Amino acid sequence: MRRGLTALLLVSGALAALLDPSAPVVALVAVSVVALTYGYSRRSEAAVLASGWLLYVPLSLVLLPYLGGIWSFLAVAIYVSAVIERLSFECELSEVLESPTGLDAEARSLAGRLSERELLRVLELIALSAGVGAVSASLVGANTNVSVLTTVTLMLFLATAAYAYALSRKT
Amino acid sequence: MPFRRAPPRLSASRSVDRKALASKPIVVELTVLNRGEDLERVRIEDALPVGARVTRGSTVLICGLKKRASATIRYEMVLEEPQEARFQDCTVFVKSMFGLTATRLQLPAPSPVTVYPRLFRRRIGMGRAKAFSWAGSAPSRFRGGRLDFMNIREYAGTDPVRDVNWKATAREGKMLVNEWHAERGLDCIVVVDLSTENLPRVGTWTARTEVVSCSYELAHALIHSGNRVGMLVLGSTLSKIRPGFGTNHLRVMLDALVRSQEGWVWKLEHADDFLETFFRAQYRQRGGTLFLVSAVGGTPLLGTVARLSRKGFAMNCVLVDTLDRQVEELRKKGLGQGPEMTQATRLAAAEREWFVNEFKSFSKVYAWNRQRGFAELEGARV
């Protein structure tokens, strides 16, 4: 799956560069490809995450004429988040599963079960994000004042998440 | 407080054979038990002892751990050198499912593994009390042996039946038995030189394994020939084992060899002082035999052999030949090719030969090689 997801990101980047061959887009895609190649060969999670987020703006700009402002950025954010989350997990997993000295059956089975659970969580994340995005977009369309409320709510949510993260680091 | 999670409560236990042979796979099982709440994503990493390499399986495991569940890492590793290796802590990373948070834990799972050298008995075949063809002053453990026929005498009532000379009995008409000289065992000390300056080294490889294997093989052969054997190991620490008989005594010497470490502290130049201190002057008066096991037949060894020989010890030098191994290690590093290497090898061999000739003035000289061992004992003399 690691190879497939990497290919998916590469194809996405190539398409973005072909459809919008402006200098900033091509530069971002080029840096993303370098980071992805490094992340794939060295199994570096940080490089994989960086490569995904470098594709965010180029892909959004490419989809902008087709989906509109809100939907293109929302869709690309969900797509990139899901793909790089799974890809970074696959990087860590492959380090264990592709050990040059092999792996015993029990460890393989445990890793396989974790992989399935993680995939399920990613799918849940996609569904939840799409749902929240759709509700927000429809509310904004109905009443322009809702956009301010949505932004404030989102900021509050991000602050709470950051607080929870800081607490969990202490444990 | 919101989102605050209870700290993970994990414990680790290890299952591994306490004793193993060098270069033989050792199966290791590390089990991590979750005593706290469910953990979504856990990465367990085991740390290998120094000098170990994994041959099967992996030392890393990724899994989820539910409450009171456990996960086991199982792998095979190999330790090439005889040593007392120790497993230390294992590292556990407790992560959230998407890896946004991570807690690192060190779980103690200590376990010692004693790695013994392999013994190649086929290399040495010798009879009782005939080790290296010298008879010593101490009576052999195998008393009543039939080394030399001495006389025929009348049956005393307690003589074993196997000593009855049936032909003479029939001829003379009375019960006659054969008399034999009791076998004499070799009374010796094996001095093992593990001082850093006398151990050849190429990169991380040292000749310690070869010296330990040779000493073990020598001690094994001497003990199993019914001789009384002591040992002195020089290196980072000084190990002394007083002369004794039997396989239990051999095990004591083997443990000392396995625990030994190379070092600068205890040197061969002072071997005669150590012998005098530990075995006292009476040892010399009893005409003991010394076996000096060293990987470098250089000036320090020559000086020591000459001094000890003048003091009255029966000297025997066992030179551990590691030249082939040194060349092999150099080749692994890409340095062993070309005419320079051939010339250097010849030079080293010539230097060794020169020292061996010098040793012969004071001592008997034997060679040991990891492939051939002592080979034929008489043929092994250089």
Image (spheres, grey):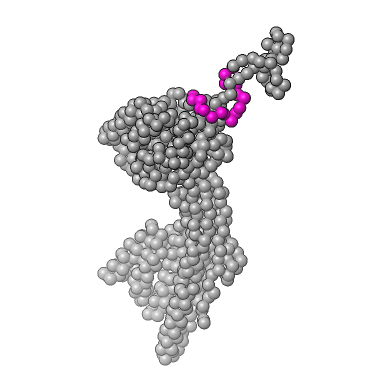
Pick the front one: B371 or A57: B371
**Relative horizontal placement of residue B216, taking residue B180 as reference (left or right):** left
The image quadrant of residue A84 is bottom left
**Relative horizontal placement of residue B75, taking residue B344 as reference (left or right):** right
Residue drawn where x is 50% and y is 54% of the image: B87
Q: Residue furthest top?
A: B171
- Does residue A139 sit above or below B165 in this rendering? below
Q: Report the magenta stretch's main SS.
A: loop
Residue drawn where x is 46% and y is 49% of the image: B52
Residue B312, percent from left and from top: 41, 30
Residue drawn where x is 54% and y is 70% of the image: B8
**Which region shows up in magenta?**
B133-149
- Kindly tell me whether residue B32 is visible in this rendering: yes
* The magenta stretch spans residue B304: no
Pick the front one: B81 or A121: B81
- Does residue B134 sit above or below A83 in this rendering? above
